[in-house]
C-alpha cells in the first residue's frame, strides 16, 4: 500500500503543530500529559501580578497564573485564575497570597496550605485570597520605631546649628578667618622649609654618600678583623682580671704616703728650712756659693797655667 505524498505532508504538518503546541505549553509551565486543575482567587489589589506569574507551594514552582480579569467597571475587584497539577490536593482553608518573589519586586502567587485535611477544594473552586505588603511597606514598618529618634536627632541638630550661628558672630568669624590665614602662612613656611631641606639634601648628597661609604668600609674592616678584635677584648678582660686580683688598695696607700712625704719635703724647702731650703731661699748663700765657685775656677785655671808655682818637685 503506497501512502500518498499529500498524506505524508499532512501527517508531518500535524506532528509539527502538535510538537509546537506542546513546546509552547511546556515553556509556559504546562504539562499536556498531566491533568491540570484550575482554581480562582479574588483580590482588591493584585500589586502587579501578571498572567504569566508563577505559582509556588512551600517555595516550589507548581503552576502558573493563566488569566486576570476585573469584575467591575471601577476595577475594585479582580478574578485571578491559575492552574496547578490535579495530583495536588488543597485543603479548603488554603490561602492564595500575592507576594514579592525577589528583591526586584517581581510578583508571584504562593499557596499557603491549610490544615483542614478533612475537606479539599475541587476544580474551579475559589480560594481565600491575601495580598502581602510590598517590600518597601515592610521596610517602612521596620523603620517606623526609629522615625521618632530621627526626628529628635534632627531637632537636636537644629539646636546645635542655631548655637553655632550664635557663637559665630562677626567678631568670631573674623578671628576664625585670621586663624585660617595664619594656618595658611604656617603651611607656606613649612613648604618653604621642606624645599630648603630638599636643596640641602641634594647639595650634601656626595658628602652623605662619602659618609655612608666610610661607614661601610669601617664595617667591612671590623668584619675582616673580627678575630683580632676578639683577641684584644680577651686581653682587656685578662688585664681587668689581673687588676681585680692585684692589691690596688695597698699600692694606692703607698703612693698616697709617698706623695704626702714629698709634699712635706717641698713645704720644708719652701719655708727655707734645711740646707736645700737655705740654698733655694737664701740669696746671700747662693751668691757666696757662686763667688766660691768662681774663685775655685780661677785657682784651677792658674794651677793649669803655672803649675811650678804650686808644685815644687825635687829628685834629690
Image (cartoon, rainbow, N blue to C red):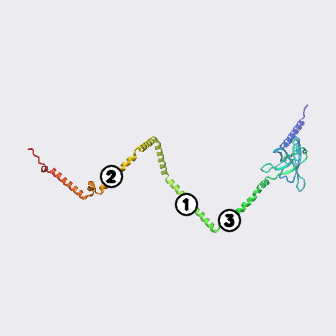
Answer few, some or many: residues within 10 Å of disc 2's Cα (few below 14, many 20 plus, some between 14 and 19).
few
The secondary element bearing badge 1 is classed as helix
Q: Position of residue 80 (x, y in %)?
A: 87, 49
Q: Are marks 2 and 1 in contact (CB under 8 Å)?
A: no
3D distance between C-alphas at marks 3 and 1 = 35 Å
- Which labelled disc corresponds to residue 189? 1
Q: Residue at x 73, y 61 (%)?
A: 152
3D distance between C-alphas at marks 2 and 1 = 68 Å
Q: Quadrant of residue 33?
A: top right
- Which labelled disc corresponds to residue 163? 3
Q: Position of residue 292 (x, y in %)?
A: 20, 55
Residue bearing the label numbered 2: 262
- Which labelled disc corresponds to residue 123? none
In front: label 2 or label 3:
2
Q: Nearer the viewer, residue 279 or 258?
A: 258
Furthest residue toward bottom: 170
Q: Residue at x 71, y 62 (%)?
A: 156
Position of the N terminus, as image quadrant, is top right
Q: Position of residue 126 (x, y in %)?
A: 90, 48
Left of 225 or right of it: where is 69?
right
The secondary element bearing badge 3 is classed as helix
In front: label 3 or label 1:
3
In front: label 2 or label 1:
2
Left of 217 or right of it: where is 41?
right
Answer few, some or many: residues within 10 Å of disc 1's Cα (few below 14, many 20 plus, some between 14 and 19).
few
Looking at the image, is mark 2 or mark 1 earlier in the sequence?
1
Residue 190 visible in the picture: yes
Looking at the image, is mark 2 or mark 3 earlier in the sequence?
3
Q: Residue at x 32, y 54 (%)?
A: 264
Q: Nearer the viewer, residue 92 or 183?
A: 92
Amino acid at each position: 500500500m503506497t501512502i500518498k505524498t499529500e498524506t505524508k505532508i499532512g501527517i508531518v504538518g500535524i506532528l509539527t503543530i502538535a510538537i509546537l503546541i506542546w513546546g509552547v505549553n511546556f515553556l509556559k509551565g504546562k504539562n499536556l500529559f498531566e491533568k491540570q486543575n484550575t482554581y480562582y482567587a479574588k483580590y482588591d489589589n493584585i500589586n502587579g501580578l501578571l498572567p504569566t506569574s508563577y505559582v509556588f507551594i512551600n517555595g516550589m514552582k507548581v503552576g502558573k497564573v493563566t488569566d486576570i480579569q476585573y469584575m467591575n467597571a471601577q476595577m475594585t475587584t479582580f478574578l485571578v485564575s491559575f492552574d496547578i497539577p490535579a495530583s495536588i490536593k488543597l485543603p479548603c482553608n488554603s490561602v492564595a497570597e500575592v507576594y514579592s518573589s525577589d528583591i526586584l519586586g517581581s510578583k508571584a502567587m504562593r499557596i499557603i496550605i491549610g490544615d483542614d485535611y478533612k475537606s479539599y477544594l475541587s476544580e474551579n473552586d475559589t480560594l481565600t485570597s491575601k495580598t502581602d505588603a510590598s517590600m518597601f511597606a515592610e521596610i517602612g514598618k521596620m523603620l517606623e520605631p526609629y522615625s521618632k529618634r530621627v526626628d529628635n536627632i534632627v531637632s537636636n541638630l537644629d539646636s546645635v546649628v542655631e548655637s553655632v550661628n550664635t557663637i559665630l558672630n562677626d567678631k568670631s568669624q573674623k578671628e576664625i578667618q585670621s586663624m585660617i590665614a595664619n594656618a595658611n602662612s604656617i603651611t607656606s613656611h613649612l613648604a618653604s622649609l621642606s624645599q630648603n631641606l630638599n636643596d640641602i639634601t641634594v647639595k650634601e648628597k656626595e658628602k652623605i654618600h662619602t659618609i655612608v661609604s666610610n661607614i661601610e668600609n669601617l664595617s667591612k674592616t671590623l668584619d675582616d678583623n673580627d678575630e683580632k678584635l676578639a683577641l684584644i677584648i680577651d686581653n682587656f678582660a685578662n688585664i681587668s682580671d689581673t687588676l681585680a686580683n692585684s692589691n690596688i688598695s695597698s699600692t694606692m696607700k703607698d703612693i698616697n704616703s709617698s706623695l704626702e712625704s714629698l709634699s712635706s719635703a717641698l713645704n720644708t724647702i719652701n719655708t727655707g728650712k734645711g740646707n736645700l731650703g737655705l740654698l733655694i731661699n737664701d740669696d746671700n748663700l747662693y751668691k757666696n756659693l757662686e763667688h766660691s765657685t768662681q774663685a775655685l775656677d780661677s785657682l784651677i785655671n792658674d794651677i793649669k797655667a803655672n803649675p811650678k808655682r804650686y808644685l815644687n818637685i825635687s829628685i834629690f
